[in-house]
Image: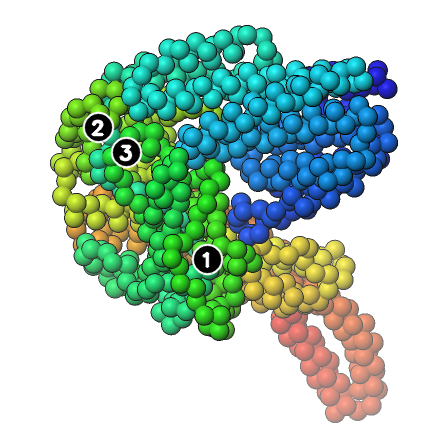
Amino acid sequence: MHGDVGDLVAALKEGELKPLRDWLTTKQVESGALCELPQWDSSRFPALLPSSRRLADRKGFAHAETLAQLPKAAAESGGVPLLLLFVLLSVEEEWEISYHYQPMWDTLSGAQECLHAHGAMVTGEDALLTRAVLALMASLSEQIRAENAMASGQWAGHEAALDAAAMHAREAIALAGRAVDAHPDVSTYVIERAAEWVVYNTAVAAAVVSVRDFLATGASLDGVIAELEAAEGGGEITDTAYLSELRAHRFSMMELNRVRHDPWLRIDRGRIVYLYPFATLGVSTRAVLDGIGAKAADWSLGGVKPLSVQGSLTLDDVWDGSDAFGRHYQGALLTLPDVVIPGADGGEPVRLQAEIRFSELGNHYVRFTVDIENAMPGELYTMMLRAAPEHGRVSVDFQDAPVPPAATAPPAAPDAEDRGWPRLADLAVHLAEDVGRCLRADRDLKKADVVARQGMFQLVVTVDAASTAPGPANSEPRREVRSATDLLDAVGAQVLTNPVTFIIGGLAEWIRYAAENALSSTATGLIGERTVRTSNTTVVIAPGVAEFTQGTRGSVAEFVATLDALFAGWSLELAGHYHVVGGIESQVNTVERGEDAGTPAPGPPPRTANTADAAESEEDARALTLSQLARALDAEKLRLNDFAIRVRSTVAFIRSPSLMAAPVAADSLRLLLECSGFQERVDELNSMIEEVTDEQLGLTIEKLARQREERQRAKLEVLLAVIAAAGVSGVIQVLQAGFFQDDTAARWAVGGVVGIVALALLLGLVLWPRNRRNQ
């Protein structure tokens, strides 16, 4: 046994988990089920919402699964500690690739609770080593909690979690040391891993404290830089992942230290607007707006009732364009109760204004707004990161929200009774999907659907007033920033010129961002204004500009930022057309192979605006004749043409100078569209439309026409053969009967033969194959 375990431990030290998994399998342990517990994308544990990262609770599953495997592992000496190590390392593997912390916490805590409740079946020396691995699990859980705090800007929580992780690691060392004689290999492995964690977490906790002090006072970071360097080179840490994290922290500390006397930026006054675009499918936007006006006052959105329903978007009059068809950018507005998020390190809660805006063009969006006051770069970074689905888990909920009466509320979300969301992005997607549910509650809008994704967020940041001072300390005298150029030269401006990151790998890593980078583009406007556009942010830098003039700039930026919803909806709608044509093509191929034409097209259609149409077309395509298939194909061709016309008309309107009344504002819109890659998105969509129209649809039409021609030719050949067979003998009989009687009979015989020949020629002309390529 010791030899086998020694080999397993040697593999674990090399980062190989498979040998341990195979060994557990030989003991009939269902290692695959244990592996899936922390995996965010496991099909066994679906999300509570289709588009959401808010996952179902797995703690009970982890408890039950651990309990099911426990007796099998307990039958082998050292089996339970190895089983728990496998669970721990499976969580650690998932942690390397995922920000879905809850399944990891659930797996660890479920396994721990199982052993606390059923630890009696683990006896002797196994019990000590089992407790050591449980302590290691507690340490890992705190390390994940520390990363969650870093991803949400909670310095105090970050430090506390790191201290707790180090404490549990020391406990694991003490317990495993008492089990070395009975289980030398596994105990030594636990001691070495725990020792690494003690050094790592202690060093990073010291770095957290130092950075927090630095940002408050500007104190030197020389001491903590030396401590991080010692932890890297001391030899206790051999795991390359932990070494790389220490190095990332150290590099950030070094850069902070380097610029600690340079001018640092503070945003004295500004605003952040968090935008989560979504598209409605299956019904026209006009029908959506009509439905909102008629019913939205009684909707339940995120478990709350709208405070008001307004039939306009409160835009200024530059949007009163001069389109020849009378089109305008207009829509409806639902105002929701304020949303509350915990403040940093136990400070005052942050309140965000919440709205849902609906546009007749189709670029709908959930909108949260918060003011910026006296924000340093690190604080601004945290505020901007709040929009991302990778933001740490916090508690997001409505403040003082009136709940709609049950009698008038449309069908609620699955978890509406347990309100509260871990991230702003979760709430936004939930609200968008609630819109879809509420629309479908109306019998006239039962085909309505919504497409929303958390990663499709956008931020619009406006800077109204800013200042700089030497170093980050707030107590230093500050100098007013009077131009965008001065602002962009200050330390911390790189937070404004980079997109919100999708991954966070170090403390204050924003300090290492490049202010000038390929991920952003800048447009210069009036009186020194700069607009910086990235893949998920638009920053309007206009210090010293009258606040009321920012309304137009902000509305233009929001308009461009929410066009992602249009493209998402169009792409999904086009996918529906692709599926419908594919189903017809499948039926044509079935007929071409000479098989039963009643075989249905494979696979369900995707969720699109044409989902109902696709389902109906797929059902109707069963056992169809070629003529019926041709009619279905013609109808789909018309729908696809209508879709292409609608898309191109909307795109032309968005780019048209007549969209806005002021030419300067229209130019600003044009520049932002260019910066946002609007034309590239349009070209891509047009290419997809042409692919479906010309390649898939065209080939199917050509194939169908060829089959119809072949069938007509076959009919003609059969008919001519019958005429030939029957006609020759009949003509001879007629001639024989007439010519052997009298002259009158002979004339009738000749006339009859001429009539038969003329009829044959007429039928030949009618049935002769024609080019039906365009039918």
Name the mark on residue 375: 3
Of the residues under marks 3 and 1, which one precedes in the sequence?
Answer: 1
Residue picked out by circle 1 = 302
C-alpha separation, residue under disc 3 versus residue under disc 2? 14 Å
Q: Are marks 3 and 2 in contact (CB under 8 Å)?
A: no
Q: Is residue 238 above or below residue 430?
A: above
List x then y, in percent, for residue 187: 73, 18
C-alpha separation, residue under disc 1 versus residue under disc 2? 39 Å
Residue 337 placement: quadrant: bottom left
Element type where label 1 sits in the image: loop
Of the residues under marks 1 and 2, which one precedes in the sequence?
Answer: 1
Of the residues under marks 3 and 2, which one precedes in the sequence?
Answer: 3
Residue drawn at point x = 48 percent, y = 45 percent: 422
Name the mark on residue 774: none
Residue drawn at point x = 76 percent, y = 68 percent: 718
Residue picked out by circle 2 = 487
Left or right: residue 504 versus residue 612 is left
What's the residue type where badge 2 is placed?
A: Leu
What's the residue type where badge 1 is placed?
A: Gly
Element type where label 3 sits in the image: strand
